[in-house]
Image: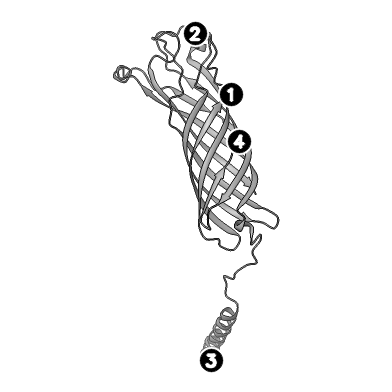
Amino acid sequence: MLVKNRNYLGRIACLILCLCASKVLAQYPVVRERIQNLPNFDKRTVHYGYFLGTNQYDFKFEYITSYYKKLMYKDIEVNQTKGFNVGLIGDLRINDFFNLRFEPGLYYNQRELVYPEYPEFTRESDLRREVKSTYIHLPLYVKINTKRINNFRPFLLAGVSTDFNLSSNKKNTDDNASNVFRTTSQNLNYELGLGFEFYLYYFKFSPSLRGVFSLQNELIPDAAEESPWTGKIVNMFSRGICLIITFE
């Protein structure tokens, strides 16, 4: 009988606690609106900032048809390294959900091409070519914003960019026969990105992940048409991924 009474009293106590808790939660909901930092920041017509970041670039190769038929050969491999980005931001507000952004910057990267063992190669050094890229990167984005949630807001980026490669070796009279790999000095890209804005007390902090995809062939062929380094390639396009952190 004593055990039954204890169980009965325990049930009553649990019921009372649940009723009290529900009353408290009704007065103070779990998800409450927080005090917004920088409440008028996004109402500015124009604002500025800067960004820092890192990048990793690859190459996409398109080969001549006869090369594909030679199954003994493999694709050219690209050893990727991490580079860095730095630049400025200019932002023009269109409305609550769209902004136009210009983010000129300096992008540095280095890639190493590893060729298959073609019969034309006589030295181990012939298998590798280093491609350094120092881009003056000039992108124009449309920034698509969602509705702000307290001090947080996701966004999408889409745009086009042009690059001026200061390390292209375009004007160099030497080519791969002298261990000089040449690329075009200017390139056109399209870009896509996803990011998140965090409104802090003094500034807005925004990490984003972006893809950069070249639209133009960047390869400058060697003087010899049958060059083992460039003779089998029709087009060479850059592809990159960037992690950008902006401060506005």
Numbered circle sitting on residue 177: 2
Camera-side residue of 247 and 67 = 247
Camera-side residue of 52 and 2 = 52
List x then y, in percent, for residue 24.
Answer: 60, 81
List x then y, in percent, for residue 38.
Answer: 66, 59
**Outermost bottom residue:** 1
Q: How much space separates mark 4 and mark 1, taking CA atoms? A: 13 Å
List x then y, in percent, for residue 223.
Answer: 45, 9
Q: The residue under label 1 is which amino acid type?
A: Leu
List x then y, in percent, for residue 211.
Answer: 49, 39
Q: Is mark 4 on a helix, strand or loop?
A: strand
When the figure is inspected, residue 161 is found, relative to residue 11, above or below; the finding is above
Q: How much space separates mark 2 and mark 3, taking CA atoms? A: 96 Å
Reading the image, the residue beneath label 4 is 105
Dot 1 or dot 3, earlier in sequence:
3
Reading the image, the residue beneath label 3 is 5
Dot 2 or dot 3, earlier in sequence:
3
Q: What element carries label 2?
A: helix
Dot 4 or dot 2, earlier in sequence:
4
Numbered circle sitting on residue 109: none
Q: The residue under label 2 is which amino acid type?
A: Ala
Q: Residues within 10 Å of mark 1 (few under 14, many from 20)?
A: some
